[in-house]
Image (cartoon, helix red, strand yellow):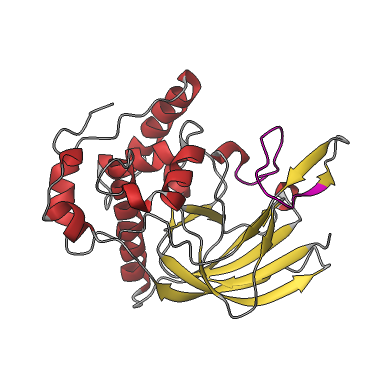
Amino acid sequence: HQDLCFSLSAALLDAAYPPSQRWKSTFTGEEDTDKNPQHCTNNKGKMNTITSIPLDMSVNAVDDMYFGCTEQMRNKLKNTQDQLSISNKSQKDLKNCLEKAKKKTDNAALTPDHVQAICTYTSDGIYKEFNRAVREDKSKYGKSFPYQSLHFWLTDAIQVLNEARRKALKKPESCETTYRRTHDVFTGKVNDRIRLGSFSSTSRRTDLKDFGKETCFVIETCLAAYVAQYSIYDQEEVLIPPYETFKITKKIEDNKDKPAGLTDSGLCRHLSLVQLLCLLAPAALANPTVIL
C-alpha cells in the first residue's frame, strides 16, 4: 500500500491507544475487525495488522460542549470523578502526575478537578476504553454513559486553557499547528469536513517520526489546549476536543517526509447537556462517586 499524508486544518488524531503507545499506534496482537486490513512488517520482523480508518464526521460521538451549563456542572461534579477501574501502575502514574501538577505555578486557571481529569486521561488505565466510548456511545449519553465526570472536566479544562491562551495572545482565536504520525492508515478526500470524534492527542513537535510513517498529519487547531505541563508523558501534547471540525486541505501519497494537513472549520455538536442533564437532572449525576 502507499504511504499517505493528510493536511488537516484543525486537529490531529489519536483515537485508540494508551498514552504510552499513542505516538506509536501499531496494532499488535489485537483482534482486527476491519474487513480489508492492510499489513506491514515492524522493525522486529513481525507482521502487524493495520486497519483502514475513514476520516468522517463521527456522528456517534459524545460531543457536548456544555455551553450554558458549565457552572451548574461544576457545582454538581466538584471534587468527584467517575468510578474507574485502573491498574496499580496507572494509579501510581496518576498519583505522580497529580503531585507534579501541584508544583506548577502556571496552572492557576485550572481547579484540582481539571488537573485530575487531565492526569487520569493521560494515564494508561482508561485511555483506550474512554475514547472508544466517546467516539461511539452518543445513544448512552445522559443515561448509562460511564464517563460523564471525566468527559466534563476534560472538556472544561480544554476550554479554560484555550481561553487563557487567547487572552495571553490578545487574539479572538487560539489557533496553532500541531503534528501527528501514525502506523494506521486513514482514508479521506481533500475538502472533506471531518471530526476526530474523541479527545485526540497531537504534538507541537515535528520530530516524532519513530511513532509511525503510514499516515502523518499537519493540523491547524483552534479549539485545542496545550496540556504538556499537566500530562504524565512529556510529548508537548496538544489535546483536541471531539467537537472540533476540520477540512482536509492536502493529501500526499508516497512521501513519508511531507505531511498533509487539516484546517480548522469550526465546531459541530449533536448533544447538549443543557437539555440532557441541566434540566432533566438524571440519576447519573445524583450520586457521583469520589475516587480520590
Classify the position of the N terminus by image quarter: bottom right
Image coords of residue 265 (percent x, y): 46, 77
Q: Residue furthest front?
A: 35
**Which residues are drawn in magenta?**
22-39
Image coords of residue 238 (percent x, y): 49, 56
Q: Is residue 19 above or below residue 137?
A: above
Q: Residue furthest bottom?
A: 191
Residue placed most toward the observer, 244 or 209: 244
Query: Total label count?
Result: 0
Is residue 272 something that shows in the picture?
yes
Q: Residue furthest right?
A: 45
- Seen at 37% across and 38% down, the residue is 101
Is 104 colored magenta in this rendering?
no
Q: Seen in the image, is 249 located left or right of residue 5?
A: left
- Seen at 62% across and 67% down, the residue is 218
Residue placed most toward the observer, 273 or 213: 273
Is 34 colored magenta in this rendering?
yes
Q: Is residue 265 above or below residue 30?
A: below
Q: Is residue 157 above or below residue 49?
A: below
Is residue 78 something that shows in the picture?
no
Q: Main secondary structure of the magenta part?
A: loop
Image coords of residue 211 (percent x, y): 70, 47
Q: Quarter-wise, where is residue 20 in the image?
A: top right
- Seen at 28% across and 49% down, the residue is 110
Classify the position of the C terminus by image quarter: top left
- Seen at 18% across and 48% down, the residue is 74
Q: Quarter-wise, where is residue 44 in the image?
A: top right
